[in-house]
């Protein structure tokens, strides 16, 4: 999920739990003083708290990165081609062989296929090569002080304090993504506390320097988010033109055997077990790539809320396990960012909840698009076009 150091955390920050809005704003020094008082109320030693916060500084670059999220406006074909290079595929296969024993242990213990973790590892940090250079404590405190999403970040400050007390966090030197994720698979401090695994047996969980720790921890986190052991997550498919497009999309599921009876078939290999529930995902409409996605695909959204990222990560995982490149088809031209915002405004005026006027084709916008396509008698494939924009 990684394009630049500033972008690493955009995707995964959305996986954090939402808390009641805590105090934010005011002078930065006063805000830090409040954090220190709360830490002591939580039972942390005063001297340790003073040392932990002793070097903290506000970081304006973090706030600039938080506001720059235009990458989400790219469509699936554009986004996936930018992120999935031959070099990443080759490095993934080399790392699969290098850490074969670790992946076998993961598959036995957590039931997470190696391709899934290799894909996260590749997109997050290029297999550990680019982990971000933002001071993690500065980033977390800066975002906690900022009143846009303080409830997402304040708990992570205290989680980082716990890691510090365990000897696994250096407030002056620990660095990572701008939104506070750390290590080769970019995990937040609270996730490290809950799911960190000492994969190399050295007595510490060090996700920056130990690939074994990072991979084992990522697998445990996926399982904690609901990953179903030894089940598929995505299959590229060919869909018949007779399919009822209103049945497609993540809001609609059928058993795999039912999809097969309707003429859906795997483009290569076989579909998943017939009794599994699955959805037909058309990321760029009925004329573009097509996938059958299973319950494990939905777990990706617990890691990250961006549909285009989730689809790319899931698809890359299949490539790393031997699937061929997808068939891009010939999708109808999509909308620009400005046009997408205009569409979202029209949808909101018709009573739909699109989750915000942001120019991003997310799940809520897609669901609203499909409902309007049905109402207008257009092919209900959830892909917004100029025709739909004009009709609205």
Image: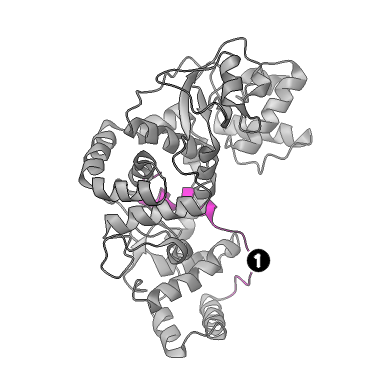
Q: Name the image quarter holding residue 389.
A: top right
Residue 57 visible in the snapshot = no
Residue visible at 54% across and 17% down in the picture: 264
Q: Residues within 10 Å of mark 1 (few under 14, many from 20)?
A: few
Toward the viewer: 390 or 266? Answer: 266
In percent of width and height, residue 370 lies at: 68, 26
Q: Is residue 71 above or below residue 331?
A: below
Q: Name the image quarter holding residue 337.
A: top right
The quadrant the N terminus occupies is top left
Q: Is residue 17 above or below residue 50?
A: above
**Lateral position of residue 85 relative to residue 220, left or right:** left
Instruction: Say what secondary structure mark 1 lies in.
Output: loop
Residue visible at 40% across and 65% down in the picture: 136
**Lateral position of residue 351 relative to residue 80, left or right:** right
Q: Name the image quarter holding residue 187.
A: bottom left
Look at mark 1 in the image and give the residue it sits on: 21
Toward the viewer: 95 or 67? Answer: 95
In percent of width and height, residue 167 lies at: 34, 76
Residue visible at 60% across and 70% down in the picture: 24
The magenta stretch is 1-26
């Amino acid at each position: 999920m990684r394009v630049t150091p500033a972008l690493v955390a955009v995707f995964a920050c959305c996986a954090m739990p939402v808390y009641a809005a805590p105090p934010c704003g005011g002078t930065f020094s006063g805000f830090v003083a409040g954090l220190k008082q709360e830490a002591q109320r939580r039972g942390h030693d005063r001297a340790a708290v003073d040392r932990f916060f002793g070097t903290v500084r506000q970081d304006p670059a973090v706030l600039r990165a938080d506001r720059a999220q235009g990458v989400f406006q790219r469509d699936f074909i554009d986004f996936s081609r930018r992120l999935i290079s031959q070099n990443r595929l080759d490095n993934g296969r080399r790392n699969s062989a290098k850490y074969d024993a670790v992946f076998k242990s993961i598959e036995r213990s957590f039931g997470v296929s190696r391709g899934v973790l290799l894909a996260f590892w590749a997109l997050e940090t290029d297999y550990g090569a680019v982990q971000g250079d933002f001071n993690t404590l500065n980033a977390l405190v800066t975002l906690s002080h900022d009143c846009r999403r303080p409830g997402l970040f304040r708990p992570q400050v205290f989680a980082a304090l716990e890691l510090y007390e365990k000897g696994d966090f250096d407030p002056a030197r620990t660095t990572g993504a701008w939104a506070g994720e750390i290590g080769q698979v970019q995990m937040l401090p609270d996730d490290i506390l809950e799911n960190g695994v000492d994969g190399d047996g050295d007595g510490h969980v060090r996700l920056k320097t130990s690939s074994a720790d990072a991979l084992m921890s990522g697998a445990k986190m996926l399982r904690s988010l609901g990953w179903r052991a030894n089940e598929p997550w995505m299959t590229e498919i060919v869909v018949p033109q007779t399919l009822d497009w209103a049945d497609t999309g993540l809001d609609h599921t059928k058993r795999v055997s039912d999809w097969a009876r309707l003429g859906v078939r795997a483009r290569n290999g076989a579909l998943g077990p017939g009794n599994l529930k699955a959805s037909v995902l058309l990321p760029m409409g009925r004329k573009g790539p097509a996938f059958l996605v299973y319950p494990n695909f939905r777990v990706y959204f617990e890691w990250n809320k961006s549909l285009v990222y989730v689809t790319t990560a899931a698809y890359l995982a299949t490539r790393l396990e031997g699937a061929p490149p997808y068939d891009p088809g010939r999708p109808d031209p999509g909308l620009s960012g400005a046009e997408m915002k205009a569409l979202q405004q029209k949808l909101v005026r018709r009573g739909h909840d699109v989750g915000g006027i942001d120019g991003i084709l997310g799940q809520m916008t897609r669901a609203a698009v499909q409902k309007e396509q049905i109402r207008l008698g257009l092919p209900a494939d959830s892909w917004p076009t100029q025709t739909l924009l004009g009709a609205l």
